Amino acid sequence: MDADPGTHPDSDLAHDALVYDTPEQVAEVAAPWLLEGLAAGDTAVIATGPATAGPLREAVGEDPRVLVVERHALYRSRTPTAITAFRRLATEHAVPGRQVRVVGEVDFGATVADWREWQAYESVINAALGPSPLWGLCVFSADLPEPLLATARHTHPGLVTADGWAPNRDYVDPATYLRTLRVPDEPLEATPPALADDAIADYTGLRHAVRALLETVDGPRDVLEDFLMAVDEMASNAVRHGTPPAGLRLWTAPGRLVCTVRDSGRSWDDPFAGYGPAHGEDLSHGGMGLWLARQLCDHVVLCRDGTGVTVRLSTGWT
């Protein structure tokens, strides 16, 4: 692969995609790239699924300098923690003046809601990880559903094949991509909520009502506590910082919780909200509500319409 990260369009992050038919194709393309990096002083990392990791490790000759990471240990279960993990990887393993080359493979999950979380992640990291000395080669099985293959095309400035690297003409600016990424329907929203307050006047009372309701739910205590904290953060934000009236609706179902929190403001529009603290590394200034919610819930989506902004939180268990 003859690729210069500096030639990647519209992005500081070197972030390429490879769509493969067989795991051996990943090894054929990615192994020379990793070895080339090692020879130049870069760090080499493999964080792919088991089917691709085996042939790739063999192709690099089981070189002990190649860091092999179980992919879920790097990507984690929630997208903000994955971003943090990649930043830490760069901090701990990058040689000054060189890059960390990562062959990565996202597990997009089993549902359309899972897909959306990781589709957004693939776009967000073009901005969130831009200053980091990372060069990512994301590999996608050609057997993935078409929406996920479309994500590969729209979120990577570079495309890689056996013939080398090429700029990606289908790459979409992250802010545009995130604003147009479809929000999956939530069937529970079509049913009567277990708790509703469409014009919050007594925030403390509502908070107690949410806790009392969740205490009746048969589910893992840690999951329920995480969800309660996320709901509390979003309701607090809507009441304290949003435009009134603010409202909350909460649904429960076996193994699933959904809550929507809305306010009537119309000017707020930040597609990257919640993928890091609002005020950066200095957490003393607050601005962590949505960032915490994304780490505490399985799915978080923001919707804007002519009447305001809605945050939908959902989580589940088996």
Image (cartoon, rainbow, N blue to C red):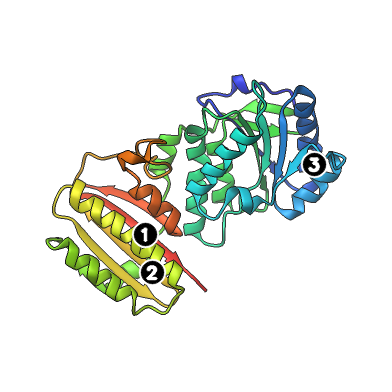
- Mark 1, residue position: 313
Give 50 or 189, whichever is nearer the viewer.
50
Which of marks 1 and 3 precedes in the sequence? 3
Task: Tell me, yes or no, whether the two marked residues, 3 and 1, touch with CB atoms within 8 Å.
Answer: no
Picture quarter with the N terminus: top right
Are discs 2 and 3 less than 8 Å apart at CB? no
Mark 3 = which residue? 27
Q: Determine the residue positioned at 52% across, 29% down.
A: 130
Residue marked by disc 2: 257
Residue 89 x, y percent position in the rendering:
61, 38
**Helix, strand or loop at disc 2?**
strand
Q: Kindly identify the amino acid type of the residue bearing the numbered disc 3.
A: Ala
Q: Residue at x 35, y 36 (%)?
A: 279
Q: Mark 2 or mark 3: which is in front?
A: 2
Image x and y of residue 174, in percent: 45, 35
Front residue of 144/208: it is 208
- Residues at marks 1 and 2 touching, judged by CB atoms closer than 8 Å: yes
Total labels: the figure holds 3
Picture coordinates of residue 306, whole percent (x, y): 20, 47
- The amino acid sitting under disc 2 is Leu
Is 237 drawn above or below residue 173 in the view shown?
Answer: below
* Secondary element type, mark 3: helix
Q: Is residue 159 at least partly visible in the picture?
A: yes
* Mark 2 or mark 3: whose residue is earlier in sequence: 3
Relative to residue 221, is residue 204 drawn left or right?
Answer: left
Picture quadrant where residue 165 is located: top right
